Amino acid sequence: MRGMKGRERTIGAFANACGVSRDTVRFYERAGLLPRARRTVSRYRVYGDEDEARLHFIRRAQAIGLTLDDIRGLLRQHEARTPDECRRVAALLRERIEGLDMKLAELRAFRKVLAENLARCEAGHSEECPVVVDLSSSRAKEAQR
């Protein structure tokens, strides 16, 4: 096991210091993102400053949209101290940006369709809503296939 540096805290104090729940700490341990906690003689989990720094890293990485697998890979690369670490991180970030760009394009197209349908609803003066009629038509059903 790794050595403790600085403060040692039980899971409750550690979770509070990091702004997460105890269950979140346990989840990250099971997911292999946090190393298994050292145990006291009475079997309490204890965490040190290194654990806190790692948990903050995990939370910040999640906040920018990285997956748990992404984070696990980043942590492994960082621990291995590979010379191409930055290149690999750049490739991962480029991939995530490309994915976001595709999602943004899909959302813009979706928004356009919604706005067009809203305009049709607001302009409609018939008994039936033109959007509902259109969505009910066989043309709409064929478009979904």
Image: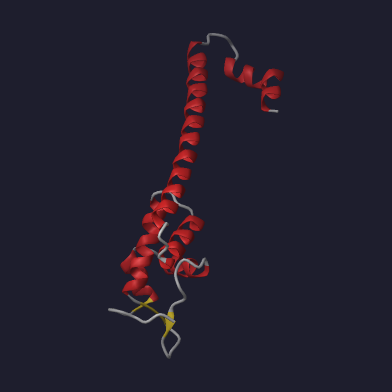
State the quadrant of the C terminus. Answer: top right
Q: Residue at x 39, y 49 (%)?
A: 64
User: In this image, 7 relative to 112: left or right?
Assistant: left
Judge from the rendering whether residue 51 lies leftward or rightward of residue 118; answer left or right: left
Question: Depth check: 31 or 42 in front?
Answer: 31
Q: Residue furthest front?
A: 83
- Residue visible at 42% across and 91% down? 41
Position in image of residue 108 (x %, y %)? 47, 27
Looking at this rendering, what residue extends furthest in the bottom direction?
A: 41
Above or below, 88 relative to 118: below
Q: Is residue 129 visible?
A: no
Residue at (52%, 22%) from the top-left corner?
113
Give left or right: position of 72 versus 127.
left
Nearer the observer, 123 or 102: 102
The x and y percentages for residue 56 are: 35, 62
Position in image of residue 38 (x %, y %): 42, 81
Residue 133 % position (x, y): 63, 17
Task: Spot the residue most to the left.
Answer: 6
Q: Is residue 104 above or below residue 58?
A: above
Q: What residue appears at the point 34 percent right and 72 percent down from the top-left corner?
A: 50
